[in-house]
Amino acid sequence: MALAGDRNIYGQGPGLQQLPPTFPGNGYGYVSPAAIAMGTNFGANVVTPCWTDKMHQKNGNVLLADGSVQQLSSSKLRDQFRNSGDTTTLAPASASIVGNCLAMP
């Protein structure tokens, strides 16, 4: 499970098949404050959630629950979310997209 990560993240569950021409937030992906459910199930052709090219050459660092920090590509980020076991939801509780809810302070 991801606890924290770099700010250059974009997308939310269930994933998009095409990236926007420009990323919001000056290229970082989100305008703070925000809460985003990244999701857990992604189709074969999705390209989000992903890292933007604003930092780390389209990679990002993620703090995991075991205390380690991993640098992940966008596809490995989706794998991490898919395998996290996180089933939390954003309010309201009936939200259709669950898992890997991130707070952007």
Image (cartoon, rainbow, N blue to C red):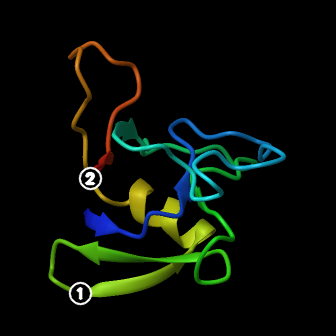
User: x and y percent of residue 66 in the render?
Assistant: 15, 79
The residue under label 2 is 85
State the image quarter where residue 74 is shown: bottom right
User: x and y percent of residue 91 in the render?
Assistant: 23, 20
> Marks 2/1: CA distance?
18 Å
Q: Nearer the viewer, residue 103 or 50?
A: 103
Q: Looking at numbered disc 2 in the image, what kind of residue is underneath it?
A: Gly
Q: Is residue 23 above or below residue 84?
A: above
In what quadrant of the picture does the N terminus appear?
bottom left
- As helix, strand or loop, the secondary structure at mark 2 comes to loop
The residue under label 1 is 68
State the image quarter where residue 96 is shown: top left
User: x and y percent of residue 46 in the render?
Assistant: 70, 47
Crowding at mark 2 (Cα within 10 Å: few <14, some 14-19, many 20+): few
Q: Residue furthest right?
A: 21
On screen, residue 34 versus residue 72, left or right, reads left
- Specify which label sits upstream in the sequence, 2 or 1: 1
Q: Residue at x 77, y 47 (%)?
A: 19
Q: Residue at x 20, y 17 (%)?
A: 93
Q: Looking at numbered disc 1 in the image, what kind of residue is underneath it?
A: Ser
Q: Residue at x 42, y 65 (%)?
A: 80
On screen, residue 91 versus residue 7, left or right, reads left
- As helix, strand or loop, the secondary structure at mark 1 comes to loop
Q: Residue at x 53, y 64 (%)?
A: 8
State the image quarter where residue 26 is shown: bottom right
User: x and y percent of residue 48 in the render?
Assistant: 63, 50
On screen, residue 70 versus residue 8, left or right, reads left
